[in-house]
């Protein structure tokens, strides 16, 4: 029996390792020239989110695999190249090198009448190959297609500067002396704004909606180690939220004092942004907050408050769209609408199809992906079995109802999970 794993990033390697531990053969297909997923620096002709200044927002102790910790020689928050090198080392240590086919793009995955999956792939030389597998694990991530406002603000087509997405951003030095507008307040937006401000002549940060900005450390402790501490996990969710909100007031004060919009929601009711730098760069005048872009006018960017600024470049850090173009229509993960997966892994009506890493936790994803991988390996090995499709769908609906109650919607939030709760759910499965 051989299982097909699509993707050789953090999730795909975790899946391949968990299967190999149980003696199950693995074929891991990766279209890039090396393992490492989003942490790889894109080569010539490639696009990817690993800009030069990218570092982990989670500490190395919680980001490395449990069987193969990140070395203590790495900094607390390693650079993307350190993470990519670590993942290569893990693949070699786990004996996965002979099971990963690089330069191999998956073209289509379809289920046959006998429930087997036919996988069509194309290698670097352009040769196509068709294979059959009883199970397929999709671990190709959800940071795949760049998301831009549709439509862009009026005048974008005649803007004399450059408009790009964060996926096309590499180095702040590329914008030496320029006037740059960075759009967004998520992780990549604040990273890129801080980075480009060290080289640009003027850096503006255009923010439509306020988000909670959390420093990497509170009271001298990394926030993800605080979130993992027994005294914190013993609190109820409302108590945790109250503690964090009070700690943020002590650590950084009100965001309005920095010229940023105050969040219209309590902490953990939407995505949070982890950053040590952006508020300092704003206070030093290196980054200037502005409201949303209303229009483009030749070489100027016009904001919703009526002000306008000359700009040479606009970098949209507006996230990504989930896309699995190789899957049949109707599979989970299609654009628009919530992701409907049992325990965030299993497609109820597609026997043998699993998704790994299609989650967004507040904290490091590694432990969760490992738990997903071990559970799937047990399912493949026949050590545990799935409930009926009806039971799985009831679990999905209960989960989505909880998401809607907490976030007010399911679109864009249906892959959100709480680390402790979800980890226990998988370990008890």
Image (cartoon, grey):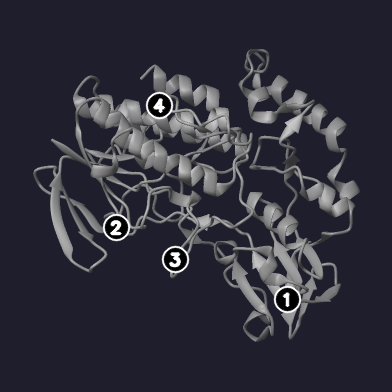
The reply, left or right, for residue 347 in relation to residue 180 is left
Quarter holding residue 207: bottom right
- Quarter of the image with the N terminus is top left
The CA span between labels 3 and 1 is 31 Å
Q: Kindly identify which numbered label has been placed on residue 152.
A: none
Q: Earlier in the sequence, mark 4 or mark 1?
A: 1
Q: Earlier in the sequence, mark 4 or mark 2?
A: 2
Q: Earlier in the sequence, mark 1 or mark 2?
A: 1
Is residue 356 among the parts visible in the rendering? no
Q: Vertically, is 262 above or below 171? A: above
The residue identified by callout 1 is 295
Q: Are marks 3 and 2 in contact (CB under 8 Å)?
A: no
In the image shown, does 66 or 348 lie closer to the viewer? 66
Q: Nearer the observer, disc 3 or disc 2?
A: 3
Label 4, secondary structure: give it: helix
The residue identified by callout 2 is 326
Q: Nearer the observer, disc 1 or disc 2?
A: 2
Q: Nearer the observer, disc 3 or disc 4?
A: 3
The residue identified by callout 3 is 46
Q: Are marks 4 and 2 in contact (CB under 8 Å)?
A: no
In the image shown, does 380 or 102 lie closer to the viewer? 102
Q: Earlier in the sequence, mark 3 or mark 2?
A: 3
The CA span between labels 1 and 2 is 37 Å
Label 3, secondary structure: give it: loop
Residue at figure coordinates x 48%, y 26% from the top left: 422
Q: Residue furthest front?
A: 73
Q: Are marks 1 and 2 in contact (CB under 8 Å)?
A: no
């Amino acid at each position: 029996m051989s299982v097909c794993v699509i993707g050789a990033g953090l999730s795909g390697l975790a899946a391949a390792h968990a299967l190999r531990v149980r003696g199950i053969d693995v074929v891991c297909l990766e279209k890039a020239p090396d393992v490492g997923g989003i942490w790889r620096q894109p080569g010539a002709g490639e696009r990817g989110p690993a800009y030069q200044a990218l570092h982990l927002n989670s500490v190395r102790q919680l980001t490395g695999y449990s069987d193969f910790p990140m070395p203590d020689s790495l900094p607390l928050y390693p650079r993307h190249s350190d993470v990519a090198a670590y993942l290569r080392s893990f693949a070699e240590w786990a004996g996965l090198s002979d099971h990963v086919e690089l330069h191999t793009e998956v073209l289509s995955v379809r289920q046959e009448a006998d429930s087997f999956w036919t996988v069509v792939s194309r290698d670097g030389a352009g040769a196509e190959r068709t294979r059959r597998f009883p199970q397929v694990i999709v671990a190709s991530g959800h940071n795949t297609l760049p998301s831009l406002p549709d439509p862009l603000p009026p005048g974008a087509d005649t803007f004399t500067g450059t408009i790009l997405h964060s996926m096309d951003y590499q180095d702040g030095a590329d914008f030496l002396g320029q006037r740059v507008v960075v759009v967004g307040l998520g992780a990549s937006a604040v990273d890129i704004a801080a980075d480009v401000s060290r080289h640009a002549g003027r850096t503006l940060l255009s923010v439509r909606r306020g988000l909670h900005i959390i420093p990497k450390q509170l009271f001298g402790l990394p926030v993800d180690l605080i979130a993992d501490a027994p005294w914190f996990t013993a609190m109820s969710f409302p108590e945790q939220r109250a503690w964090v909100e009070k700690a943020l007031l002590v650590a950084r004060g009100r965001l309005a004092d920095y010229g940023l919009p105050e969040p219209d929601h309590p902490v953990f009711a939407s995505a949070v942004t982890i950053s040590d730098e952006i508020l300092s760069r704003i206070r030093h005048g290196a980054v200037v907050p502005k409201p949303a872009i209303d229009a483009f006018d030749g070489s100027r960017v016009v904001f919703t408050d009526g002000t306008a600024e000359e700009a040479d470049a606009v970098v949209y850090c507006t996230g990504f769209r989930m896309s699995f173009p190789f899957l049949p229509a109707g599979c989970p993960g299609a654009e628009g609408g919530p992701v409907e997966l049992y325990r965030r892994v299993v497609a109820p009506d597609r026997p043998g199809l699993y998704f790994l890493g299609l989650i967004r936790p507040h904290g490091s994803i590694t432990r969760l992906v490992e738990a997903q991988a071990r559970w799937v390996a047990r399912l493949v090995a026949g050590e545990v079995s799935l409930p009926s499709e009806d039971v799985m769908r009831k679990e999905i609906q209960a989960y989505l109802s909880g998401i809607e109650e907490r976030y007010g919607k399911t679109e864009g939030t249906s892959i959100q999970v709480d680390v402790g709760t979800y980890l226990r759910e998988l370990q008890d499965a």
